[in-house]
Amino acid sequence: MSACVRTRATDSDTNRTQRVHQPHSPPPPRRFRIAGADVSASIAVFLIALPLSLGIALATGAPLQAGLVAAAAGGLVAGLLGGCPLQVSGPAAGLTVVTADLIHRYGWRTTCAVTVLAGLAQLALGCLRVARTALAVSPAIVHGMLAGIGVTIAVAQLHIVLGGTPQSSVLANLRALPAQLADLHPADVAMSVLTLALLLLWTRVPGRLGHLMRKIPAALVAVAGATLTASLAGLSLAKVDLPSWSSHALAGLPEGPVLGIAAAVLTTTLVCSVQSLLGAVAVDKLVAGQPGLSARVGRSDLNRELLGQGAANIVSGALGGLPVAGVAVRSSANVQAGAVSRNSTMLHGVLVVIAALLMVPVLELIPLASLAALVMAVGIQMVSLHHIRTVTRHREVLVYAVTTLGVVFLGVLEGVLLGVTVAVAVALNRLAHTRITHDEQEGVHHVHVRGQLTFLAVPRLSRTLHLVPQGTHVVVELDGSFMDHAAYESLQDWQNAHTARGGSAELTGRRTGVRIAEHGGPAEPGNPTNPTGPTSATSSESCRCHPWTPWRQHRCERPQSAPRSGDPTSGHQLARGISAFQRNTAPLVRGELARLAREGQQPSQLFLTCADSRLVTSMITSSGPGDLFVVRNVGNLVPPPGEESGDDSVAAAIEYAVDVLRVRSITVCGHSGCGAMQALLNSAPESAGSEPGGVQTPLKRWLRHGRPSLERMADDGRPWARLATRAPADAVEQLCLSNVVQQLEHLRGHESVARALREGALELHGMYFHVGEAQAYLLGGEGEEGGDELFIDVGAVDMSA
C-alpha cells in the first residue's frame, strides 16, 4: 500500500499532486539489491539442500555430483524463470524411484536424455497453459503416490544403513533383508543411528536453547555430527566419493526401445509436474499466512512455474543432473526463514555451485550410511499420518491404499494409473448408489436421500414420495452434492402436486446447509437460491435467510408490514431461524465448535465496528468461528481513556483482547450511511448532546465520543480523510472516514494498546465498508506524508492471496 501515490489534501485544493520526473530528466539508475532476509534464507535452504541432494543421488544410484547439478539448476533456472518465487526446486525424493529404475534399465546417459525430454514436454504443457489441469488429480492419488515412493526409498536405504547394498525392487529388498541383518556392519549402523538420533532430537530441545538450536537445520547437524564422529574415531566405512568434474558424464542420445523411452518421459513429466504444481499451491498457503509477505510476493503463476521447471530439467539433464521438481521441505524452510523474493532461491543455487567446486575435500568425509539414514527418514516422513486421516475422513482410503501398493510393487506410473482407475470406479459407485428412507416424527414425514440424486434413483424416489399421505407436512433432506435434471423435475412435479392437495413440502440440502424449497408459498420462478436444483420458494410471512447461502445468490422477501406487539407470528421468525440452524447448519459446524470449546478462543484480531445490521463481519472478512473478537457499538466509537462515560465496556474489551487474548491486530471499521454519523452532523455544537430542554438521552450521551471526529473534519489545518479511487460522496461519508482515523487515535491512548505497539506485538488498521457498493477500503500508508488519511480500495492491490 505504501507504493500508492503520496498525496496531501487541503480544503481549498481538490487536485492531487504527484512527484514525477520531469520529461527531460533521465530516471535514476536502478541498482540490483538483495534483501538481507533473502541472504539469510538462502543460507538456511543451502544447508538443507546440500546433504539431501547427495543423499538422493546416492539413493538413485546416480553419480553423486548429479544431485549437486540438479540443486544448482533448480535454484538458478527454476528460481529465475518459475512462477512461484519462493518455491525451491531441486532433486526431489518423489523422483528417486523413477530415476533409479531408469538408471537400472537404460544407464545414466540415457536417463539424462529422458530428463531433457521431460523438460521439453513441460515447456510444451506450459505453453498450452494446462498447468491447472494437474490439480484435478485426486489428492488421495497424489498422497498415495508419495507414500508408495517413501516406502520404496525407506526399504532400499535400510540396506545401506546396515552396511550392505540395496536390490532393484522392494520385494527383492525384503527377501534380502534377513541375510543383511545377519551380516551387520557395526560402523555403518552406529553412524546411521547417530544420524537418526540427531534428526529426531535436534528439534525437540525445549526452551530458549531449543529455539536457538532450531535455527540450524537438523539435516545439516545430523550429517555433520556423524561425519565429525567418524573422522575423529577413525572408523573404516564407505564415504562419499566425488570423481573429478572432468570425468562427469553428460546427457547422450537415448538408447532403448521407443515405447520404453516414451513411458519413461511420460512418468518423469507427470511426477515432476504434479509435485511442482502442488508444491506451488502449498507455498501460496504458507505465504498467505503472512499478510505482509502475501502483498509483496503475490500468488503463483502455475503455467509460468511449469515453464520454469521445464527449463530447469533441460539444463539439469544436459549437464548430467537428476530430474528437478519443487521440493516441499526446502520451500517451507525458505518461507519460514523470511525470504521475500526469488533472490533467495537463486542465491541458494549459487551457494551449491560454490560448494560443488570448492568443498569437495569436506564432502568426501561424509559417511554414505549417514546420507542413507537421512534419506530413509525422508522416505518414512512421506507416509504422512495426517494424509491418511484426511483420505479416511473423505472416504477415499481405498484409492490411497491401492495407489500406494501399486507404486511399491508395480512402479510409479503403473501405481498412479491404477489409483486413477479405482478413483473413477469409486466415483461411479457413489453416483449410482443412493439410499432413500422414509419415517414419521411427531406428525412430520421425513424423506432422507443420501447420495447423489440422478435419473438412476428417480424410480425409487418416486415410490418413496408416493408413500407420503396427502395433506401432510413433508421434509425432504438431500444429503448429497449433485442432482441432475431428471431428479429435479421429478421432485418439482411431486412438490407441486402435494401442495395442490393441501399438503406442504420443504426441501433442504443437509450437507450444504442450503434450503432448496420452503413450504408456505409457491415456487418463485427465477429465484437462484439453490444453484444445483429447484428454485427457492420463499414464505410470504417472514424473511427466509438461510445460513451459508452464497451471498451473490441471496434473495429475501420481507413482510409487507411489521408484526404488531402481541401478534403470535412475531416470534415465528426467530423460532424458524433457530430451527433452520439446528437442522441445516449445526451438523456442519458441530465438530469445529466442539474443538473451539475444548481449546478456547484464540482470535488473531479485534474487530471494532458499528452495530448497523447491514454489516456482517464474518462475510466481509471471510472469517469463521474463533477468528475475530468482535466489538460492536453505535458509530464504532472508542471512548478516550480516562473520560467519564458511564460505560467501560469498550475499554474492557480492548484490555481483554490485548492483554488476555494477545490479538495481533485491531481494526476499526466504519461504513457508509451510518446513522450515528448523520446524528452527529445534525446535532448542534452548543447542545453538547442534550435536547433543547436540557434532557440528555443515553444515545446522545454516547455520541459525544464522536464529537472529536467532527472537530477533526472541521479543522482547516488537517487534510481530510479521503478515498483513493474517488472523493467522498457527501458530508456523512466524509465524517465516516474521519471518524475511523480519529478512533484509531483514541485507541493509541489506551495503556494496553500503547504498550503492545511499543513492543511491536500489535498493529492498528482502519477500514471503511461501502454497503451499497459491497466495497472495502483499508487505511493505507500509515506514517507517511498525508498517508494516514488515505483509504485504499482493496481491489486495487493484490490481496487475493
Image (spheres, rainbow, N blue to C red):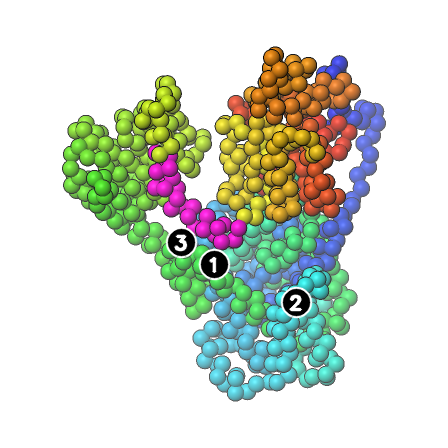
Query: Callout 1, which amino acid?
Result: His
Q: Which of marks 2 and 3 is in front?
A: 2
Along the horizontal axis of the image, is 409 left or right of 101? left
Taking the spot 62% from the left edge, 43% from the top edge, the residue there is: 656
Closer to the N terminus: mark 1 or mark 2?
2
Residue 526 makes an appearance in the image:
no
> Disc 1 marks which residue?
387
Closer to the N terminus: mark 1 or mark 3?
1
Q: Distance between the residues labelled 1 and 3?
A: 11 Å
Along the horizontal axis of the image, is 126 left or right of 138? right
Query: Callout 2, which amino acid?
Result: Val
Query: Mark 3 and mark 2 in contact (Cβ < 8 Å)?
Result: no
Taking the spot 37% from the left edge, 37% from the top edge, the residue there is: 578
- Residue 382: % across, % down: 52, 63
Q: Is residue 481 above or below residue 140?
A: above
Q: Quadrant of the C terminus?
A: top right
Q: In which quarter of the image is residue 56?
A: bottom right
Closer to the N terminus: mark 2 or mark 3?
2
Q: Nearer the viewer, residue 576 or 278?
A: 576
- Secondary structure at numbered mark 2: loop
Taking the spot 53% from the left edge, 68% from the top edge, the residue there is: 380
Query: Callout 3, which amino acid?
Result: His
- Residue 15: % across, % down: 73, 17
Q: Give the range drawn in magenta.
A: 576-600
User: Could you classify mark 3 by the number of other residues whose Cα lies within 10 Å: few (under 14), some (14-19), or many (20 or more)?
Assistant: few
As drawn, the label of residue 205 is 2
- In the displayed orientation, state which residue is furthest to the top: 692
Q: How far apart are marks 1 and 2 (CA)?
A: 27 Å
As drawn, the label of residue 394 is 3
- Secondary structure at numbered mark 3: loop
